[in-house]
Image: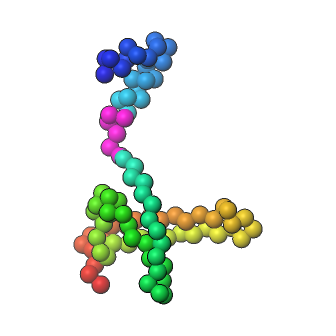
């Protein structure tokens, strides 16, 4: 870390040090993946990428909440929010 401090100017050394410490001490990470929508003939389906399902420890029976905000006048503003809800023991239904 000392080598990094020598590479920054004195004027922003404290800011860079704080940024480096925050990155090192971060307890969160971001996994971004894309999945295609498929169909079983009646419904649309999405498979969760394994890297995401493993990171969240997803299991059968856990819940996904969907919230669609539809702007009929400006469809480019439509949004879909997806939230994952882990159940205590899953569900084999």
The quarter of the picture where residue 78 lies is bottom right
Query: Which of the 4 image quadrants contains residue 69?
Result: bottom right
Residue segment shown in magenta: 23-28
Residue 27 vertical placement versus 16 (above, below) = below
- Decide if residue 42 is on the left or right side of residue 78: left
Q: Is residue 2 above or below residue 46?
A: above
Q: Nearer the viewer, residue 71 or 39?
A: 39
- Report if residue 69 is visible in the image: yes
Quadrant showing the N terminus: top left
Image coordinates of residue 90 in percent, x first then y, are 27, 74
Residue 55, percent from left and from top:
30, 57
Quarter occupied by the C terminus: bottom left
Q: What residue appears at the point 39 percent right and 70 percent down from the top-left corner?
A: 47
Residue at image point 55% right, 65% down: 80
Q: Is 31 rendered above or below residue 39?
A: above
Image location of residue 2, percent across then percent down? 31, 17
């Amino acid at each position: 870390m000392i080598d990094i401090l020598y590479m920054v100017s004195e004027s922003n050394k404290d800011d860079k040090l704080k940024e480096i410490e925050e990155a090192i001490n971060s307890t969160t990470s971001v996994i971004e993946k894309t999945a295609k929508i498929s169909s079983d003939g009646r419904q649309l389906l999405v498979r969760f990428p394994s890297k995401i399902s493993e990171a969240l420890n997803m299991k059968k029976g856990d819940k996904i909440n969907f919230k669609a905000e539809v702007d009929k006048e400006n469809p480019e503003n439509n949004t879909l929010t997806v939230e994952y809800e882990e159940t205590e023991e899953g569900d084999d239904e």
